[in-house]
Amino acid sequence: MRGIIDRFEGEWVVVEIDGETKDFEKRIFPKAAVAGDVVEINGDKVKILKTETEKLRKEIEKLMNDVWED
């Protein structure tokens, strides 16, 4: 399953998946994982999807620029 890391809470990582949040143990995530990363979760294996994360960040940046444009 794929999702976006929403936040870290102690030993838990909150991930948004299809509009809902689920908690996962922090120990299964790569140490480099940060809020906003797109991840793929397969059992106790988590992979950061760098290309999808960068695409999402660019989309959000564009939306923010459009909102704050004079």
Image: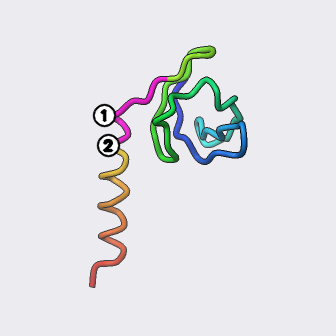
What residue appears at the point 59 percent right and 35 percent down from the top-left corner? 17
SS at circle 2: helix
Residue 21 drawn at (x, y percent): 67, 41
Furthest-front residue in this view: 31
The Cα–Cα distance between marks 2 and 1, rounded to whole angstroms, is 5 Å
Label 1 crowding class (10 Å Cα cut-off): few <14, some 14-19, many 20+? few
Closer to the camera in the image, 14 or 16: 14
Residue type at mark 2 is Glu
What residue appears at the point 34 percent right and 78 percent down from the top-left corner? 68
Q: For this view, does 58 lie left or right of residue 16?
A: left
Q: Which residues are magenta?
A: 47-53
Disc 2 and disc 1 in contact, CB within 8 angstroms: yes
Q: Quadrant of the N terminus?
A: top right
Number of numbered tags placed on the structure image: 2
Image-quadrant location for residue 29: top right
What residue appears at the point 50 percent right and 43 percent down from the top-left corner? 34
SS at circle 1: helix
Q: Which residue is mark 1?
A: 51
Label 2 crowding class (10 Å Cα cut-off): few <14, some 14-19, many 20+? some
Q: For this view, does 28 lie left or right of residue 36?
A: right
